[in-house]
């Protein structure tokens, strides 16, 4: 080698270490300037800068410099395959090589300090202003606050070497600006120029950097304008809570949760929740608090890991917390109303479990007024009339005696028996000490006497009206709109005379129109199957009449005599007798139908006959997906059943029980009664729903078109590789534009039922639709639009709507997938805007000025299919790779 490291670096023989750093600084800035030129005009080749790096390595190492000064020997040519991570990070032209190496590197290697200098790969990347490398290292888990031998961090290096953009990058990644090096200097004090100093000044006053540096007093005492606690910041897209949890700032994290109501389950760009980040960092106190506040432990990040698995690197410190939560006493959880515990940790336990005194979980929840737990237990099959071992009291007894009005309302809406007497020979009505509860129970008994089997929940329009019904009523199955109005409390019946399904107005040509028929005609989806309770929005004046909703035609009726003729000609007949016994559940099997009668359901023997058809002709009876059609008849003129039975089809886990509305084409089901018959007489059917994603997403058989008979999904490569479920044929003449809408798999059935709706709409499931908590909030002005978020948003970019802000991952077999709605949009129905997701990286086929389409008319959208996109093609493989990176045994994570 003709030249020397001194000449290459631009230093002289007597340069001290500080002067060598300045010389290296100048070479790095020369490279930065050179890289701003077009490639063909660049003057500094990667090979030349490689010599600069080798020269600095030689002269900044005391032993290597002494050897060169004595023998003129130095290493200037190293094969890239033999580079350390530090050497790769120091050369921006080797960013791709660094990423390839990091992909398989363990976390300890990523944060490993050089044995002489103490430099980490992140420190070297920051010093060389290798922005891409720093972002990737941070994403891979590099810690920006590790000190090298002089006590300086990567932020010190970025400041000293004059890289304002790197200072910004590190601060926005959570670097700590409070760390002093061995010279007693903070990073800001080592600033090389005014641009760096201004960058510190600016960012140190921003909420995210304040959170990263544990400035709790600032958040408490300063009017800092942090009005949207769930805003996601910078390239990692982390909220303030995620930042505090990642850094281990316990008191700050608790303040964000308890005082500001931070959302616990928002995920960042790597799909890490706050719980993931706290577990990964080994911050046990924060993990414990997040778990006890209900943070979702089932969320999976982009490496296929749950938060518990991310904590495995810390031995049992983290994993014991999750185990302790799983092992909590479920009866105490029911008493305390810890709903999240049941959602995440109940697993395969029985919802009818009883404690050592013979008291059921449901009774405990109802006795203490824990309505959310009670609702969860009922949704998961808890026996609503289970009696305690000693007092023989039902959950309704407990709720009534202890004055829990809303819990009593819940139990009655789910079909609780009001006639059961406990060992004190008292009914729930007689146990009640509250006058309002007594009136409620009395009205319910009167409703049962005239077979009022159609529950209706009425909601107010708009978020200010709350998320609970403003009124609930029970109606006969032949009820009309007029009957609904008359059933309302006197204070409401004179005001609320107009109604909608998810803001699609009921057709009120006449108040004598059947309620179920009106709901069918106004509903978005074209299916004859109607779930109860009916969740309607009530209005004091006509609303949404001109919003583009179109009522469909009445469904053609099926005459009762014709139905009976066909049914009688084909049915088989069975019979059994329900005996007047107490404390004994009775089960009867007729064909493949099983009827279960609870104990104390009758005071006298009740003989019943069953007429049934297994696998009836779908066309003849207009019942797609029907497994069984049946009718129960009581041989006595007046049956003595106090409680109706449940009916199930053996071997059919995905069958739902429906009841025919005579002289119509409609069938209704009490979705929350778990196959309990709503009435004894009449025709009932078991309908097999199509299980699209097991346990997460099912559809009625008349709600979509299968692409190939017997095959649910079609594999497609356009617009990207995906599995496709066809819902309907696109109407290209009315809806010429293609767009997409990312969502959660749990919401798709509701969306298909009601269409995409405006924010704050109560949909037919009773849920109020709200914008994503981590996106633009309601009421804020953006792009010149007041209350910008008050609209429906779709995107012409499949990549954009697949962003974690919109699309939520879910497990499918060994994959993690996202669901995206394939839509067609009416011409001239939308305004186009650029990305509203900060730091979204456009793809090559994205139109950056038209990524967000804003619509204010739900009728301008046609949903034609559902796209299922794999995010992780094999979670098993992804977890094993991540385990290797964390340095833990992959088998421990299974």
Image (cartoon, rainbow, N blue to C red):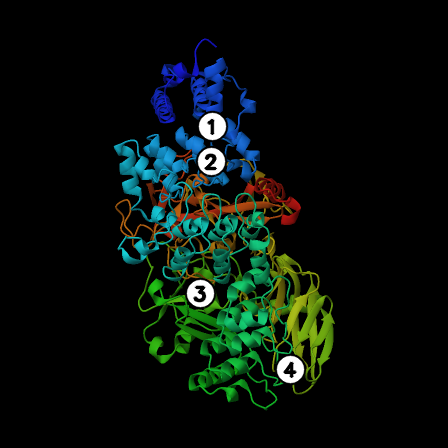
Mark 3 falls on what kind of element?
Answer: helix
Q: For marks 3 and 1, give the CA distance.
A: 63 Å
| Residue assigned mark 1 | 95
Decide: marks 2, 1 in contact (CB < 8 A)? yes
Query: In this rendering, would 700 be left or right of 552?
Result: right
Who is closer to the viewer here, 228 or 372?
228
SS at badge 1? helix
Nearer mark to the viewer, of 4 and 3? 4
> Residue 367: horizontal and vertical position, in percent?
52, 78
Residue for point 56% across, 24% down:
82
Numbered label attached to residue 116: none
**Res 146 seen here:** yes
In the image, which disc is placed on residue 136? 2
**Disc nearer the start of the sequence (3/1):** 1
Instruction: Tell us which disc is closer to us: 1 or 4.
Output: 1
Say which residue label 4 marks: 389
Relative depth, front residue between 470 and 204: 204
Question: SS at mark 2?
Answer: helix
- Disc 4 to disc 2, C-alpha distance: 61 Å
- For marks 2 and 1, the one nearer the N-term is 1
Residue 762 appears at what percent x and percent y? 41, 62
Residue on which disc 3 sits: 518
Mark 1 touches mark 4? (CB < 8 Å) = no
Label 4's element? loop
Image position of 482 with respect to 206: above or below: below
């Amino acid at each position: 080698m003709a030249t020397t490291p001194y000449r290459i670096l631009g230093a002289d023989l007597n340069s001290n270490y500080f002067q060598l750093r300045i010389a290296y600084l100048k070479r790095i800035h020369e490279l930065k300037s050179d890289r701003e030129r077009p490639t063909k005009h660049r003057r500094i080749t990667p090979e030349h800068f490689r010599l600069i790096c080798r020269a600095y390595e030689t002269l900044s190492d005391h032993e290597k410099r002494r050897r060169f000064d004595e023998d003129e020997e130095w290493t200037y040519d190293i094969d890239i395959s033999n580079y350390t991570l530090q050497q790769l990070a120091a050369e921006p032209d080797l960013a791709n090589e660094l990423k390839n190496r990091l992909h398989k590197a363990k976390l300890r290697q990523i944060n490993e300090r050089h044995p002489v200098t103490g430099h980490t790969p992140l420190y070297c990347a920051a010093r060389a202003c290798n922005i891409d490398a720093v972002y990737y290292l941070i994403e891979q888990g590099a810690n920006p606050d590790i000190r090298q031998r002089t006590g300086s961090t990567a932020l010190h290096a970025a400041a000293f070497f004059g890289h304002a953009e790197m200072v910004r990058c590190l601060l926005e990644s959570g670097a700590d600006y409070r760390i002093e090096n061995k010279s007693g200097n903070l990073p800001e004090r080592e600033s090389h120029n005014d641009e760096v100093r201004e960058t510190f000044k600016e960012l140190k006053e921003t909420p995210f950097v304040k959170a990263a540096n544990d400035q709790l007093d600032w958040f408490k005492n300063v009017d800092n304008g942090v009005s949207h606690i769930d805003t996601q910041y910078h390239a990692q897209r982390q909220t303030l809570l995620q930042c505090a949890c990642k850094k281990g700032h316990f008191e700050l994290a608790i303040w964000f949760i308890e005082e500001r109501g931070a959302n616990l389950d928002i995920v960042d760009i790597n799909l890490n929740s706050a719980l993931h980040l706290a577990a990964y960092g080994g911050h046990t106190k924060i993990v414990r608090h997040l778990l006890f506040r209900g943070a979702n432990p089932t969320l999976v990040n982009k490496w296929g890991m749950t938060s518990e698995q991310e904590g495995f690197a810390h031995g049992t410190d983290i994993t014991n917390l999750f185990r302790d939560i799983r092992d909590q006493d479920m009866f105490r959880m029911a008493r305390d109303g810890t709903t999240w515990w049941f959602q995440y940790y109940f697993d395969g336990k029985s919802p009818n479990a009883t404690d050592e005194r013979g008291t059921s979980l449901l009774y405990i929840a109802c006795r203490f007024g824990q309505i959310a737990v009670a609702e969860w237990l009922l949704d998961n099959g808890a026996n609503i009339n289970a009696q305690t071992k000693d007092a023989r009291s039902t959950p309704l007894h407990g709720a009534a005696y202890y004055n829990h009005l809303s819990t009593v309302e819940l139990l009655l809406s789910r079909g609780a028996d009001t006639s059961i007497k406990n060992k004190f020979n008292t009914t729930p009505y007689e146990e009640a000490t509250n006058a309002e509860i007594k009136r409620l129970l009395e009205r319910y008994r009167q409703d049962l006497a005239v077979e009022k089997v159609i529950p209706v929940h009425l909601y107010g329009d708009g978020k200010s009206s709350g998320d609970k019904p403003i009124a609930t009523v029970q109606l006969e199955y032949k009820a009309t709109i007029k009957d609904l109005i008359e059933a309302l409390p006197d204070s409401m019946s004179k005001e609320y005379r107009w109604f909608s399904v998810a803001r699609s107005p009921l057709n009120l040509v006449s108040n004598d129109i059947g309620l179920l028929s009106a709901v069918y005609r106004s509903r978005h989806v074209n299916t004859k199957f109607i779930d109860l309770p009916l969740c309607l929005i009530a209005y004091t004046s006509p609303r949404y009449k001109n919003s583009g909703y179109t009522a469909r035609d009445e469904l053609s009726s099926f005459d009762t005599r014709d139905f009976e003729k066909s049914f009688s000609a084909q049915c088989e007949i069975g019979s059994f007798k329900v005996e007047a016994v107490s404390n004994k559940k009775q089960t009867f099997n007729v064909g493949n139908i099983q009827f279960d009668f609870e104990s104390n359901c009758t005071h006298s023997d009740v003989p019943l006959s069953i007429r049934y058809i297994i696998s009836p002709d779908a066309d003849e009876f207009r019942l797609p997906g029907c497994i069984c059609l049946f009718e129960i008849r009581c041989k006595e003129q007046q049956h003595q059943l106090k409680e109706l039975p449940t009916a199930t089809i053996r071997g059919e886990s995905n069958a739902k029980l429906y009841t025919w509305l005579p002289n119509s084409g409609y069938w209704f089901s009490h979705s929350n009664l778990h196959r309990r018959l709503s009435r004894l007489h009449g025709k009932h059917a078991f309908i097999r729903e199509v299980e699209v994603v097991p346990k997460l997403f099912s559809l009625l058989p008349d709600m979509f078109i299968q692409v190939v008979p017997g095959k649910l999904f079609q594999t497609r490569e356009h617009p990207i590789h995906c599995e496709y479920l066809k819902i309907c044929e696109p109407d290209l003449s009315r809806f010429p534009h293609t767009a997409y809408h990312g969502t959660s798999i749990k919401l798709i059935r509701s969306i298909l039922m009601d269409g995409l709706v405006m924010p704050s709409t109560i949909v037919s499931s009773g849920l109020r639709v709200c914008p994503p908590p981590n996106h633009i909030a309601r009421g804020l002005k953006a792009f010149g639009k007041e209350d910008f978020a008050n609209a429906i948003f779709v995107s012409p970019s499949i990549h954009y709507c697949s962003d974690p802000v919109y699309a939520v991952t879910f497990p499918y077999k060994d994959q993690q997938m996202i669901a995206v709605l394939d839509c067609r949009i009416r011409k001239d129905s939308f305004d186009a805007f650029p990305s509203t997701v900060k730091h979204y990286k456009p793809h090559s086929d994205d139109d950056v000025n038209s990524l967000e389409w804003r619509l204010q008319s739900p009728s301008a959208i046609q949903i034609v299919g559902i796209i299922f996109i794999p995010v992780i093609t094999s979670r098993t493989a992804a977890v094993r790779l991540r385990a290797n990176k964390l340095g833990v045994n992959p088998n421990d994570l299974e």
